[in-house]
Image: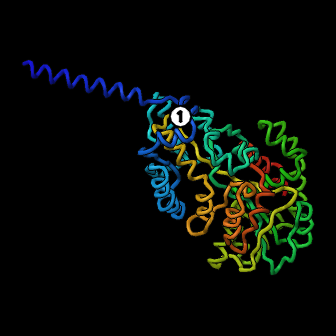
Amino acid sequence: MKIRFFIMISVLVVIIAGCSNDESLSISDEEIQNQSFEEIAESAQGETVRMYMWGGDEGINQYIDEWVKPKLQETYDVTLERIPLDTNEIIQKLETEKRAGQEDGTIDIIWMNGENFKRAKEGELLFGPFVDQIPNVEDYYDTESLDFQYDFGKATEGFEAPFGKVQFVFHYDSSKIEEPPATLDELMEWIKQNPGKFTYPDPRDFTGNTFLRHVLYGKASSVEKILEEPFSEELAAEESANVWTYLNDIAPDLWREGQAYPSTLSELDRLYSQGEVWMTMGYNEARGEVLVEDGIFPDTTESFILEDTGSIGNTHFLSIPYNSPNKEAALVAIQLMLSPEAQLIKLKPTYWGENTPIDIDKLDQTKRQDFDSIDRGDTVLEQEHLMETFIPEIDATYVPWLKEKWIDEVASEQ
């Protein structure tokens, strides 16, 4: 009997000690935010970080699985699991957990931007601010840049770290156009001199809407005002007045005299590939390379950006959920993915071929040469030019507003 009693007491002591040990190991968000990166990296050893992200591109998946995962294990002794899921579903999952009071979740890193970030930030679904704890951000990124401070007009405030970006460019057939226009006014003049050879997608298509946002940037009285002030009907109406004048002025000389517009970017690309129009456009500065390689675009395709509008860029980011169970592992994983080495691999067409948000001027000469030496293809503009012309997205509310106003102000007038 005494032996059984002794065993029971021993078991209870072990259980109590284990519970006490768990409590001592638990760490609050505030304590994590007060740690140095070295302390965070030490705590993260042996942990598993689960990265939830859209999984629809095999090249992107291979980059994460074949390069990031083993590199993270080798460098920080952290295991990465990639969980493919639509970003909207990820946010819905977090919202459900928040309502249920679930403080111990299953998601450690989210790849997202735009409306999803706005939803997550306003719903208090994110851990942070954390960006100041990532040494690579301070060392290699321009933290004062508007495209990092705002995500589709929503202030990031350190709740997401820049992971990559794409930019809007125009493509043209250099066998038919010797010198592309450099400004909106020059584009208008070119359209009038070459009737029927230019159009843009219906703004219900994202690319068509992005073209409208470029016209807005070029014709607004103040780009800073649009970026910094919250959306309002009054501000939008005031700043867009010249947009509708411009679009109505070019309409008669567009393809089909502005009586019809391509419903999608794919339709505009088809018109370009068949020579019906001599320009197309798109929200990815490298997309023309694949289309030329596949024989869809003519091999005389080149790219340009309008100087007075700049090139709207879509930066995408990495965030950490409020209830991530492995925040230290998430921080070291983000540190790795934002390193020059990781960004260089991501830039190569081997996996992803996507542009980098790194500030090339912050790199030493050797690293800069590594980035400069990558051949992204003849249709892709120089990295320096892309960075110089990069402008951030405006408040996401402008997207549906411009679509509806275009129908009223332009389409119904033709």
Q: Nearer the viewer, residue 324 or 222?
A: 324
**Image quadrant occupied by the N terminus:** top left
Q: Nearer the viewer, residue 74 or 413?
A: 74
**Image quadrant occupied by the C terminus:** bottom right
Identify which residue is drawn at 72% across, 75% down.
378
Which quarter of the picture shows residue 246?
bottom right
Viewer can see residue 108: no
**Is the image coloured rainbow, by chain, by secondary structure, or in one colour?**
rainbow
Which x, y percent locates residue 16? 29, 23
Identify which residue is drawn at 75% across, 67% down.
381
Identify which residue is drawn at 77% across, 55% down.
390
Which x, y percent locates residue 27? 47, 30
Q: How many numbered marks are there?
A: 1
Q: Is residue 400 left or right of residue 127?
A: right
Q: In this view, does 295 lie to the left or right of 412?
A: left
For mark 1, does the 10 Å Cα neighbourhood hold few (<14), some (14 to 19), or many (20 or more) residues?
Answer: many
Which quarter of the picture shows residue 115?
top right
SS type, badge 1:
loop
Which quarter of the picture shows residue 47?
top left
* Residue assigned mark 1: 322
Q: Nearer the viewer, residue 379 or 46?
A: 46
Viewer can see residue 27: yes
- Amino acid type of the residue that numbered disc 1 sits on in the rendered structure: Tyr
Identify which residue is drawn at 84% across, 43% down.
224
Q: Nearer the viewer, residue 151 or 141?
A: 141
From the viewer's perspective, is residue 180 above or below residue 153? below
Which x, y percent locates residue 328? 50, 40
Which x, y percent locates residue 104? 44, 33
